[in-house]
Amino acid sequence: MRLALSIAGWIVLVLLVGVLVAAAWFARPLGKGELASKPSPADDYEEAVRRIDEVEAAEAEMPLQPVGRSYALLHPSRTETAVVVFHGYTDVTDQFSKVAQGYYDAGFNVWVPRMPFHGHIDRMTNDQSKITAEVLRQAADANIDIATGLGHNVEVIGLSGGGALSVWAAAERPDVTRTVIISPLMLPHGYKPWMVRPLARLVAVLPDSYSWWTEKQAAEPGPEYPRYSRRGITAYLMMAERAKAHGAKGARPVRGDVVVVSNLADTHLDTTYPIDVMRPLVREDRSFRSVVIPASEGLPHDFVAANGENAERTRVAYRYLSEAIGIPLPDPLGLADAKDKTDTGN
């Protein structure tokens, strides 16, 4: 009996140690080393344009939707500031078409890259399962590298998954002078911050699975993917977690100005968490600002795409977006342009 109790005790001890080791593994920082920036900036405007040409040539061979391709709005030479626009996860570059035009009209060179495995004609593609944090890191670095040749300063803006890349860029790229972070994919609604790491680790080792964003979107045509990959979402979460890890010991790695846009009506993501994470990361000599959209405005998660789920409220959304960006934006629905043509008889 004494021997049996001893064996049982050893079994319990081994199980306990195993649980503790597993818990430590699941809770350790995400992307600690492999997600560090590896910059290779363009030397000048001509080099940046050459890289853009290479991207567009490669995409011309891919089965992509026209509204899903990378595109640039360029002035004849390097501008004071260039902006990189990161679209949302499962969305397309056309999501930011009006915003990109606003930047260009204000004198910026603008680069709107397609995110990896996005924009396919086959909206049910399983290529989303190929999205990893390292793939996103490479894409973020490469596209910011292009912008360094397009402008003397670099601004980065992104929504949702693109917002997570903007969070990463603010913390990892000292050459980014300003970041506008819109509803970043950092903490899904209903989750606690401590849950992100173990859930991301678990998803990474399990077979990938897909879910519909909404039943309505699944039934409607459109350029966006109607479903999402859990592995894909995890990759974006890991990019944002990389930035969060910088602040674990009180570091302030963000050398540029930061604006965080929080939409309190967003039912997909925690709206205050990005502010809590980013504010302590910004150096004292740089500015941090938050633009809060009240829940009473009733804006959905994607309030940027002029022809998306928010079409009826897009003008309201763009007033807040213009405040965050600091430049005037075109009429998102094009109604002002149509009125001008009618008034002039064109």
Image (cartoon, grey):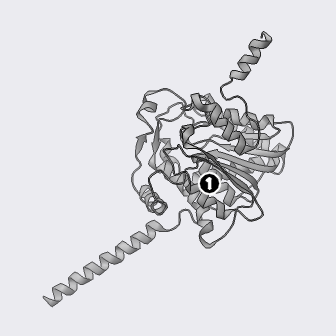
The answer to whether 180 appears left or right of 327 in the picture is left
Instruction: Mark yes or no: residue 9 visible.
Output: yes
Compared with 31, 55 (above or below) is above
Total numbered badges shown on the rendered structure: 1
Identified at 74% across, 12% down, the residue is 342
Q: Position of 219 compared to 242: left or right?
A: left
Q: Residue at x 68, y 46 (%)?
A: 157
Quadrant position of the C terminus in the picture:
top right
Residue 275 placed where, x, y %?
61, 56
**269 horizontally vs 104: left or right:** left
* Amino acid type, callout 1: Arg
State whether residue 316 is above or below residue 88.
Answer: above
Residue 74 place in picture, x, y as percent: 80, 36
Which SS class for mark 1? Answer: helix
Q: Badge 1 is on which residue?
A: 137
Residue 136: x and y in percent read: 59, 51
Q: Quadrant of residue 311?
A: top right
Residue 22, how many percent across, how many down? Answer: 39, 70
In-front residue for pair 303/138: 303
Q: Who is closer to the viewer here, 315 or 286?
A: 315
Quarter of the view holding residue 64: top right
From this viewpoint, which residue is outermost toward the top?
345
The 10 Å Cα crowd at callout 1, few under 14, some 14 to 19, many 20 or more, is: many
Residue beneath the point at 83% across and 43% down: 46
